Amino acid sequence: MKILGFILIFVSPPFLKKVFLKWFFKAKIGKGVRIGWFSTLSGSAIELGGHSEVRALTIIRCGGQVKIGDYSVISNMTMIYGASGFAVGEQCYIGPQCLINTDRDVTLGDVSALGPRSMIFTHGSFLPYIDGYWVKMDSVTIGNHVWIAAGVFIHPGVQIANNVFVNSRSTVTGCIAEDQVIAGNPAKQISTMSGLKRKMRPKRVDLAARQVLDSFSELTLQKKFNIQPVEEGGFKKFRYKNNDYSIGVIPSDNSGQLDYLNNFKVRHIILSNIEQSTSMWASHVLVFDLQNRLTCKSKDVIHRELWAFMRMYFGITFRYE
């Protein structure tokens, strides 16, 4: 029956996939989960957290438990297979065309990422063991806040601690301690995360938010939607689908800009660096709360595009309040 379910999930349209997952695998599926075309999952138990995604042309076939945390994404054309389990925490990202062998358990912590075309193996062998050649089978564990860049190869038995960056095209053969930046083949420490990370004072967060909006204006509004925003009073103003928009930053010192948001004829989208819950704002103001990383769940196209843009290009994930 599970093989039949695996096949039916693969060929069914996205709106039926969750139905078949619950039917054949008794899957626990959170709110807002999305599964793309020609993707399928199987496991001894399946749990998909709220607002998680398994994108198109991805196959997950594990003998053990499959668990994907809230707001985590398994991207396109990824293959995850093996006799044991696969678990990722919250707000994780597995890039396109990754290959993950789960003959032993593979685990990622929270807010961790595996870049495109990276590979994790828990089983390594080919030449005959009885002729004296080696075989290695061991689990792989990756901690919290770990960024593994594109094209990285991770050997069986590797354990990566919290707060680590693995540079692209590296080969990880041994365990990595906390707070390291590593690179090479075999990968070795070249720096520390704490040494590279900037201290973000409120004013610096204000500046970073403005830089994010400048990039969003260039790459999404101008190049994707062919919109030319007008800069006025620190806000980017434009018209899209018969709606007037204003996008800007409410800085940490507030700068007296809140009065501007009282214009109900304009749809405001703001990055707020002040202490105020998103539920306190008027309905025509869509807020990204930078301090608590929260926003509202909205069908507004520009709001959704900005949500995805900040996650993809700047690593900033917002939960829905």
Image (cartoon, rainbow, N blue to C red):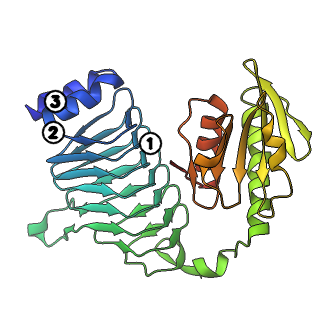
Q: Residues within 10 Å of mark 2 (few under 14, many from 20)?
A: some
Q: In the image, 137: left or right of 260?
A: left
Mark 1: amino acid: Ser
Q: Residue 124 versus residue 140: which sits nearer the camera?
A: 140
Residue that label 3 marks? 5
- Can residue 285 be seen from the camera position used here? yes
Rendered position, 230 above or below 207:
above
Residue that label 1 marks? 75
Quote the CA–CA distance across marks 3 and 1. Answer: 22 Å
Task: Write the residue at 23% across / 28% down.
Answer: 19
Quote the CA–CA distance across marks 3 and 2. Answer: 11 Å
Task: Write the residue at 56% across / 34% down.
Answer: 298
Mark 2: amino acid: Lys
Quote the CA–CA distance across marks 1 and 2. Answer: 23 Å
Question: Does label 3 or label 2 sit earlier along the sequence?
Answer: 3
Q: Residue 188 versus residue 53: which sits nearer the camera?
A: 53
Q: Quadrant of residue 78?
A: top left
Q: In the image, 176: left or right of 190?
A: left
- Can residue 226 be seen from the camera position used here? no
Mark 3: amino acid: Gly
Q: Are marks 3 and 1 in contact (CB under 8 Å)?
A: no
- The x and y percentages for residue 5 are 16, 29
- The x and y percentages for residue 227 are 80, 27
Q: Nearer the viewer, mark 1 or mark 2?
A: 2
* Rendered image: mark on residue 26: 2
Q: Residues within 10 Å of mark 1 (few under 14, many from 20)?
A: many
Question: Does label 1 or label 2 sit earlier along the sequence?
Answer: 2
Mark 1 falls on what kind of element? loop
Rendered position, 258 above or below 184:
above
Locate the N terminus by quadrant.
top left
- The x and y percentages for residue 314 are 64, 54
